[in-house]
Image (cartoon, helix red, strand yellow):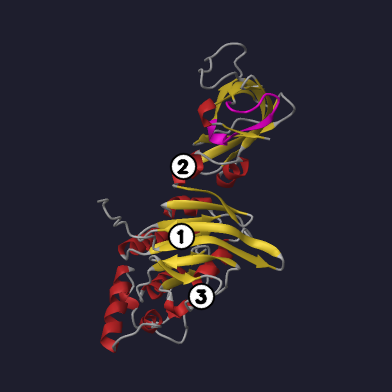
Amino acid sequence: MPTPDTTPPPRLEIRNITRHIDGRRVVDDVSLSIHAGEVTCLLGPSGCGKSTTLRMIAGVEMQDSGEIWVDGELICDTVFRVPPEKRGIGLMFQDFALFPHLSVADNVAFGLRGSREEKRARVLELLTKVDLDRFIDGFPHQLSGGEQQRVALARALAPRPRIMLMDEPFSGLDNRLRDGIRDETLTLLKQEDTAVLLVTHEPEEAMRMADQIALMRDGQIVQRGAPYNVYTRPVDRAAVAFFSDTNVLRARVEGALAMTPFGRFLAPGIADGTEVDIVFRPQHVRIDFDRNGKGPAPTASEGSPARGVVERARFMGNESLVEFRMDFDGAMLKVTVPGVFMPRAGKVMWLTVRRDKCFIFPA
């Protein structure tokens, strides 16, 4: 007899969700699944349908087609609908929305059921986890922005939701607070074994928090995977550019090779005569000084050197950004160098590009 499948279903699963607003398809056939204890980031530019997807899962909006499942049970299609308050889903938004007239304890306990003692014990447990138990009888106006955010997190987790939906929850915090609070939030959510869907337009936030990234564009998920895979194996030129600055060379394929001022690039599987974009990030360019025919020869992985003239250089903190005016077509190339590197404008240098860090897409 075959062994029965004991794998638990996804904590959250959405199947072929669509949503039209004013005649425009804002969410277009989106499917996604998240398991307990997993964090998935829905990443994309403003207006791509991220927040609308979140609102449909929460039950605030109805989808035009598709289904939403929680722990293997249907909670919403176009006919059947579990009310939002019965879905076991927590919500966190950029606006903390704490009640100013209620104490911290009463804010966290809002919506909790049980005796007064049971509520107080749950509130104290969560405030201790976010290191705010000393403020249990204080009021929101006595807290900093970061502390208010942690109270909002405790309130969202108090009813033990199976799923947490987070819409840009950290964007209102300054940079000094953001990283620490993101890490604390992630730790607490993992401890509670909550499935998390985080909406953000910031690639750095998605890379820092997510187990899986779903890259969204024009209402569709165009790529999904672990952060490393989404970053290093992008599906198209726009996916590369969403995570970092890019340089682009236009070339034509002949004999599975694309000829460029930096030498030949392999273009397997692309038909002869096809124009392609060769895309590479600024950190994958190597700089040499004016070699005058001498100096270190490029390695096989770097191809041929091309001559450029420094247009400007800027120190960015952890690295320096140098922009070059290249000899070919007057093209501008961006190069980043760790630490301080500030060559003067007009300085001639030679650049090579790492073949293994380039992406080739049909133009």
The magenta-colored residue range is: 268-284
Question: Callout 3: helix, strand or loop?
Answer: loop
Q: How far across and how far down the image is residue 73, in percent? A: 41, 68
Q: Within the magenta stretch, is there residue 282? A: yes
Counting residues from the start of the chain, the first of labels 2 and 1 encountered is 1
Q: Residue 178 carries which label?
A: 1
**Spatial distance from mark 2 to mark 1, Cα to Cα?**
25 Å
Q: Residue at x 50, y 51 (%)?
A: 204
Residue 140: image quadrant is bottom left
Query: Is any part of residue 179 visible from this angle?
Result: no
Within 10 Å of disc 2 (Cα), the crowding (few <14, some 14-19, many 20+) is: few
Which is nearer the eye, 354 or 198? 198
Task: Pick out the residue farthest to the top.
Answer: 293
Identity of the amino acid at label 3? Phe
Amino acid type, callout 2 = Asn
Which mark is drawn over residue 210? none
